[in-house]
Image: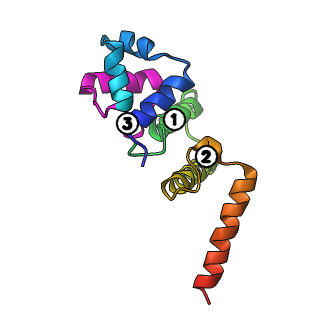
Amino acid sequence: MVTFADRLKLLRTEKDLTQQDIANILNVGRATVAGYETKGKQPDFDKLCKLCELFNVSLDYLLGRSEIRDPYNDLEAKLYEETKDSKSLDINELNKFFDNIDKELKAKKAETLAERFLDLLIDCGEIKTKEDLTTGKALKILGKIFDQLKEDTK
């Protein structure tokens, strides 16, 4: 399972920020941020909120409780943009809008499933990190899974 420490480090490196950068934003020492990333320390609520705002993610995502960064604000923003200039809502436009949202949510669900699959591969020792998974390894692992499924259904 992904932890707060994992997420913080991932988000920090995605934005090319150093531990010192985060420390300056949170008004703490660099060692405190290192503790968040390695020693299981947790920031207080105000600092968690600052981190969520900085990385534009939900608190659930930051804490490792969800794989979806922030679908609700995205949906609200899109709905607002689609309807802000409309005097009345056209049912066909709304249907098109919700069809697009449905496609996006399905894509996010597939992304989430892929992340969970990678986490499972790490947990069972097939790979050490997500970066270790090559196409060849993936095909071998899938082959093992399908072979096991065949055996289980006999």
Q: Is residue 97 visible?
A: no
Indicate yes or no whether the magenta region holds residue 46. yes
Secondary structure of the residue carrying numbered label 2: helix
3D distance between C-alphas at marks 1 and 3:
22 Å
2 or 3: mark nearer the eye: 3
Name the image quarter holding residue 16.
top right
Identify the residue position indicated by label 3 in the image: 4
Left or right: 128 in relation to 72: right
* Total number of numbered discs in the rendering: 3
- What amino acid is found at the position of numbered circle 2 in the picture? Glu
First in sequence, mark 2 or 1: give its number: 1
Q: Residue at x 63, y 41 (%)?
A: 131
Q: Residue at x 61, y 76 (%)?
A: 148
Asked if disc 2 and disc 1 are in contact, CB closer than 8 Å, the reply is: yes
Which segment is the magenta one? 39-61
- What amino acid is found at the position of numbered circle 3 in the picture? Phe
Give the number of the disc on residue 74: 1
- What amino acid is found at the position of numbered circle 1 in the picture? Asp
Magenta span: helix, strand or loop, mainly?
A: helix
